[in-house]
Image (cartoon, rainbow, N blue to C red):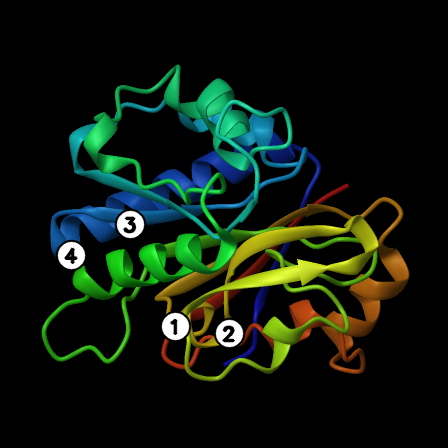
């Protein structure tokens, strides 16, 4: 299935509208909405706008596609960003927010999160299926914490793994391709400024970047691009 490409001049509002529509569709179909958040600066105002929506927030379940191996109150933490931009504004029950524990030993943190998601998969599903996974894309084509040249790119069995990123001299926890590609819908949220060459190659199918290997097996893929 070809990805849907949405270029928006009203990125924040329209991206929040789009996530809300996905939420309502999942709630109507299955009675809950499993949303995986991405880190970075681009989604922050989108999360704050999304928090204003009139949803049954007690039925929204939140996961994270990756996390830096730092405590949750560290400024580098994706959880801290999501708390400030979304959780502090929307009445999502604390028990519905499943953070990656970056303060643990990286291997232990990855195994714990993998077991958590595995325990939540529906009967008959080989892997846990998110309703919507939000991702970003870096100038080097990385997504989640799947960076060029790192071991997690070749993982085919594990769904969450610890990944050492040499360019930052840091361990990170990240979803792997099996989990990303099991989702019902994956959506990239990004501003194309400074990323045009990589983005053009990925959308044309000519670039072998980490983000180019996100291809849901039985789901949809959307690129939501801000001008």
Q: Position of residue 34 (x, y in %)?
A: 28, 49
The one nearer the camera, 34 or 127, is: 127
Q: Earlier in the sequence, mark 2 or mark 4?
A: 4
Tell me what residue is drawn at x 35 percent, y 66 percent: 184
The residue singled out by tag 3 in the image is 34
Q: Earlier in the sequence, mark 2 or mark 3?
A: 3
Residue 113's disc is none
The Cα atoms of the two marked residues, 3 and 4, are separated by 12 Å
The Cα atoms of the two marked residues, 4 and 1, are separated by 15 Å
The Cα atoms of the two marked residues, 3 and 1, are separated by 14 Å
The residue singled out by tag 4 in the image is 29
Total count of labels: 4
The residue singled out by tag 2 in the image is 177
Image position of 38 with respect to 76: above or below: below
The one nearer the camera, 5 or 217, is: 217
The residue singled out by tag 1 in the image is 219
Q: Is residue 56 visible?
A: no
């Amino acid at each position: 299935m070809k990805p849907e490409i949405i270029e928006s001049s009203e990125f924040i509002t329209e991206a929040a509208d789009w996530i809300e529509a996905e939420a309502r569709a999942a709630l109507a179909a299955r009675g809950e909405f499993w949303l995986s958040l991405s880190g970075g600066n681009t989604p922050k105002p989108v999360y704050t706008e999304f928090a204003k929506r009139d949803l049954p927030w007690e039925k929204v379940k939140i996961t994270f596609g990756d996390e830096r191996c730092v405590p949750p109150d560290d400024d580098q933490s994706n959880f801290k960003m999501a708390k400030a931009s979304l959780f502090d504004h929307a009445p999502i029950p604390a028990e519905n927010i499943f953070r990656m524990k970056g303060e643990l030993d990286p291997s232990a943190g990855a195994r714990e999160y993998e077991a958590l998601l595995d325990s939540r998969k529906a009967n008959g599903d080989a892997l846990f299926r998110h309703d919507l996974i939000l991702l970003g894309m870096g100038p080097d084509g990385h997504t989640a914490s799947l960076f060029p040249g790192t071991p997690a790119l070749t993982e085919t069995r594990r769904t969450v793994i610890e990944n050492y990123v040499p360019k930052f001299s840091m361990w990170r926890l990240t979803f792997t391709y099996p989990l990303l590609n099991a989702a019902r819908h994956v959506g990239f949220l990004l501003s194309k400024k400074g990323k045009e060459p990589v983005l053009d190659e990925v959308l044309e199918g000519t670039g072998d970047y980490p983000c180019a290997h996100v291809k849901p097996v039985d789901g949809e893929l959307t690129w939501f691009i801000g001008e």
